[in-house]
Amino acid sequence: MTLLVTSELSRRFGGLNAVDQVSLVLDRGEIRAIIGPNGAGKTTLVSMICGRIAPSSGGIAFEDQDITGMRPWHRVRHGIVYTFQITSIFGNLSCFDNVALAAQRSDTWATGRWWPRGHGHLAETVLAVLNRVGLSGRAAARASTLSYGHQRLLEVAIGLALKPKLLILDEPTQGLAEDEIVSFCALTRDIAREATVLLIEHNMPVVMEIADRVTVMENGRILAEGSPAEIRADAQVQKAYFGT
Amino acid sequence: MTGATPRRDWLLHLAVIALLFGVQFVLPAYHYSNVSKIMVMASFAIGYNILIGYTGLLSLGHAMFFAAGLYGAGLTVHHLGFDPLSGFLAGLLAALCLSVAIGLVALRTAGVSFMIVTLMFAQAGYLLTLYFGEFTRGDEGFVLKENLLRVVVGDTGFNLIDPAARYNLALLLFTVCLLGSLVLVRSAVGRVLIAVRENEQRTAMLGYNAFLYKLLALVISGTMSGAAGATYALLFTYVGATFAAIQYSILPLLWVLLGGAGTTLGPLLGTLLMFYLVDVSSGQTSSYMLLVGAALIILVLWAPKGILGTLREKRIPWLP
Ligand SMILES: Nc1ncnc2c1ncn2[C@@H]1O[C@H](COP(=O)(O)OP(=O)(O)OP(=O)(O)O)[C@@H](O)[C@H]1O
Ligand SMILES: [Mg+2]
């Protein structure tokens, strides 16, 4: 049942304990939200999980395997996929090529070959993924010409094409319009039927609506953890996060 | 850009090759020899372009790969009596080994450090050609003897320095390099190289070991440059240290920037234009390098993406 365990994971930047002895357990199939004020260490924590940042101490286990020292591209192969807080698509490439980069990678992993299957097969996969996030029809468009909301969706599409077991979404709804947020919530629930979702989110209504469990961080530490309702009722959280 | 219309670019490239094949029947002797040389140098530029244009790595030391091919072929034919084909393969192998070795070291750096490291290695290579002057005859160089360049095919044969043989062998090299680069950039690997150029960090988070892809690009680029060097030695018979000097690291950079970095046909166009720009201006004035410099400044100011790069942006988006 357990997918990911971090044990006393810490990261220091100079004198700052950005993440301080965080022990987190994720179950397979859940949607876990991480909330917390700016600078709480959320991005740093998930960056260690996906391998972008090395921990100062502590360990990470994924599917009962120690992955603490594993290189980021190997973690992707094991199913840990990160979508960036700051939109980080390939602006000069078409939407098709953006997703194809991810799709051809997971295709070679699936077949165990060096080379992805032919163009027709790849195109089919790419268009299906674009369709799933609602970007069908934009395949040929240059990614940088998309609206901000669509760029965030493309970011998710790239993640999906990698066939993740754990999809980490770092503030995916930031800067989206109301109706885009609604369809994003539906998409996330859809994704969660095949993958575990770790969601960093500031938008509380979104968290309350889609998260199975919520972890609250402050100053690099876990302050509280529980169901959305429990978190809403927690007095400590109220004070730290909602400022009341 | 979705790769849905690969026909058009194949037709365009085949047309360029057919054109180069056709003009040999009408070119006057002087230009005949020039175009042969341009096709070899354009192959060098195509190799360089794979690194700078498609992978985003700026090397200032590609003369060492060209020279590895040049000396690999030249020395083995001149001193060891290799036949031309074996000499060519020796040059190819020398460039291949050199680019693997250089890549493993130089690719640990990036950006300006990469430029400096490649520059230093190339300088070391240049000094080596002088140091081993006993074999290379240094700056003065040596000339391959005509009788060493005979190729026997069945009962007949031909000599590499025969103008028609030279032109068509140069065209063969160019064809392989051009179509090879087209296949590469249109392939799954080419897509990753472009992704590395655009955003290396992000590419790693898509599950790619960017170092391996950069190494692959450098090895293809260096080997292609070496193939051009080996061909140059065999077709134009002169092997000298000038080809290992910094000038021959800068020239492919200029050719590619002029024609358009990251376009498959840019290297040919850039080499062709630069060659005739120098040719015409050196006839008019002794300070022809000044004219070349001025032309480049104009280019950088008005068309920083080079001729075909600008054309792709403004008019023909499907250009590979
Ligand atoms: N590369 C870095 N070097 C130095 N300090 C850093 C670095 N990355 C993050 N920090 C610091 O670590 C702390 C935690 O940052 P982090 O980005 O993890 O916070 P966050 O919870 O994601 O915040 P936000 O909600 O603003 O995204 C912050 O004080 C930040 O300034
Ligand atoms: Mg953050």
Image (cartoon, coloured by chain):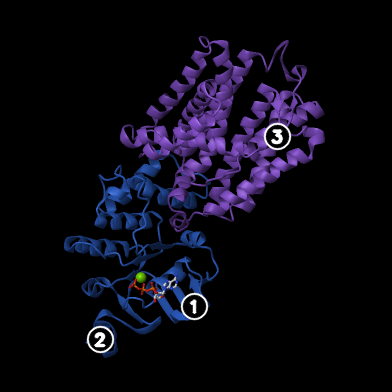
Discs 3 and 2 carry the same chain letter: no
Name the tint of chain B in the rendering.
purple
Give the labeled residue for mark 2. Answer: A238
Do the numbered discs 1 and 3 sit on residues whose CB atoms are within 8 Å? no
- Which chain is represented by blue in the image? A
Looking at the rendered structure, the kind of residue marked 1 is Gly
Closest to the observer, B199 or B281: B281
Q: Chain of mark 2?
A: A
Mark sitting earlier along the chain (2/1):
1
Residue depicted at 69% across the width and 29% down the height: B88
Discs 1 and 3 carry the same chain letter: no
Q: Nearer the viewer, mark 1 or mark 3?
A: 3
Residue depicted at 52% across the width and 38% down the height: B253
Give the labeled residue for mark 3. Answer: B241
Looking at the image, can residue B4 be seen? no
Looking at the image, can residue B296 be seen? yes
Q: Nearer the viewer, mark 2 or mark 1?
A: 1
The picture places residue B70, in percent across and down from the top left corner, at 68, 32
| Local secondary structure at mark 1 | loop
User: Residue B182 bears which disc, if any?
Assistant: none
Residue depicted at 54% across the width and 24% down the height: B282
Task: Find the distance from the CA under tag 2 to the CA under tag 1.
Answer: 30 Å
Looking at the rendered structure, the kind of residue marked 2 is Gln
Q: Is residue A167 above or below residue A235?
A: above
Q: Residues within 10 Å of mark 3 (few under 14, many from 20)?
A: many
Residue B112 located left or right of residue A38:
right
Ligand 2 lies in quarter: bottom left
The picture places residue A48, in percent across and down from the top left corner, at 46, 70
| Local secondary structure at mark 2 | helix
